[in-house]
Image (cartoon, grey):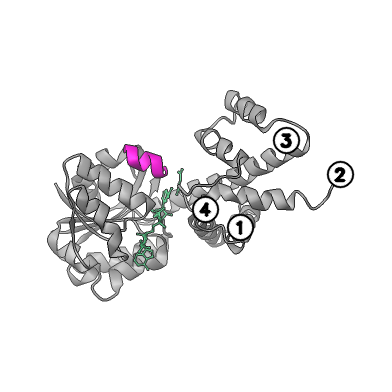
Amino acid sequence: MEVGFLGLGIMGKAMALNLLRHGFSVTVWNRTLSKCEELVESGASVEETPAGVIKKCKYTIAMLSDPSAALSVVFDKDGVLEQMCSGKGYIDMSTVDAQTSSKISEAITKTGGCFLEAPVSGSKKPAEDGQLVILAAGEKALYEEIIPAFDVLGKKSFFLGQVGNGAKMKLVVNMIMGSMMNAFSEGLVLADRSGLSQQTLLDVLELGAVANPMFKLKGPAMMKNAYPPAFPLKHQQKDMRLALALGDERAVSMPVAAASNEAFKKARSLGLGDQDFSAVYEVVKVAGSSEES
Ligand SMILES: NC(=O)C1=CN([C@@H]2O[C@H](COP(=O)(O)OP(=O)(O)OC[C@H]3O[C@@H](n4cnc5c(N)ncnc54)[C@H](OP(=O)(O)O)[C@@H]3O)[C@@H](O)[C@H]2O)C=CC1
Ligand SMILES: O=CCCC(=O)O
């Protein structure tokens, strides 16, 4: 199967490499074209524009940073729309809001092409290992056609109905995850300031009802103040912001998420946006220092 791939960041690179490893013929494009080199060494072809990729491939996947990037790659000069037509499918796996996804869907559909949104749960390692959870919505026929690629990229795919439902599901999941990361950070600080071993806290958490892969994976690095980026903090803050906007729309009060968003914003303002989202721990630590015992 031949697929195009737009966006070779942390996730896109891992996903495109995975497709290549599984025998897919992959044509890539990235805004910073030099990032395509590693993919070429692994057998990918390169095009110089998103339009070039669309022209060449029946199916094109995008994995871009945020709504503005997702829109720009579709609507700008040399973008997706210039070559989109009947018989082609566009699958946007970026995390965006439902409005962005619907705008892209409408434009693609007007050309006769098919659209699927398919954001993912799971980070750098699951992307490398083909263990993502795919939250698809949009054109069911395209979903069925692209399943061979989803089977390589993920351990489970959900089809959630109309465009927007995948985006919303992803934002709800990441809103919960961002709030959990803040609560976890507060717990690490509280344990430390109470004279408890943080490692013992991790061991206790691991055995109880709140055990989860995120605490287990991130905890040891956080204890060493290390935040190698798997999920950049700036993207987690974008997801909190978009989830809060969804809450505004639906009149859902989300004080925990709102407070977590503030902590992520503060972390960004301190220059931690490109670190892993667990770097919010730095903000929680400082906030926890304001009253000395
Ligand atoms: N990292 C993670 O754990 C996960 C991330 N996601 C989501 O996946 C998406 C990608 O994340 P990730 O790979 O981590 O992000 P990165 O920041 O590593 O990569 C972002 C990609 O978007 C491209 N890009 C940014 N702005 C533009 C623009 N204006 N025009 C064209 N291309 C642009 C970048 O190009 P360039 O190289 O030129 O900067 C790069 O290819 C995001 O929506 C994120 O929320 C979802 C699940 C997990
Ligand atoms: O959007 C990023 C999600 C990261 C994860 O699910 O671990």
Q: Is the magenta stretch mostly helix, strand or loop?
A: helix
In the displayed structure, would residue 143 be above or below residue 99?
above
Residue for badge 4: 275
Q: Label 2: few (<14), some or many (≥20) within 10 Å?
A: few
Q: Is residue 56 magenta?
A: no
Q: Residue pushed farthest bottom?
A: 77
Residue for badge 2: 293
Q: Do the residues labelled 4 and 1 touch (CB within 8 Å)?
A: yes
Nearer the N terminus, badge 4 or badge 1?
1
Residue for badge 3: 191
Amino acid at dot 1 = Ala
Amino acid at dot 3 = Ala
Q: In this view, does 68 lie to the left or right of 87?
A: right
Closest to the observer, 203 or 223: 223
Q: In this view, does 23 lie to the left or right of 117?
A: left
Which range is magenta? 122-130
Nearer the N terminus, badge 1 or badge 2?
1
Amino acid at dot 2 = Ser
Nearer the N terminus, badge 3 or badge 1?
3
Residue for badge 1: 267
Numbered disc in front, either 4 or 1: 4
Closest to the observer, 2 or 42: 42
> For disc 1, does the CB lie below 8 Å from ligand 1?
no
Position of the C terminus, as image quadrant, is top right
Question: Regarding mark 3 in the picture, which secondary structure is present there?
Answer: helix
Nearer the N terminus, badge 2 or badge 3?
3
Q: Which residue is drawn at 34% across and 70% down?
A: 72
In the displayed structure, would residue 148 be above or below residue 92?
above
Q: Position of residue 135 (x, y in %)?
A: 36, 46
Q: Regarding ligand 1, which quadrant of the image does it lie in?
A: bottom left
Q: Distance between the residues labelled 4 and 2?
A: 31 Å
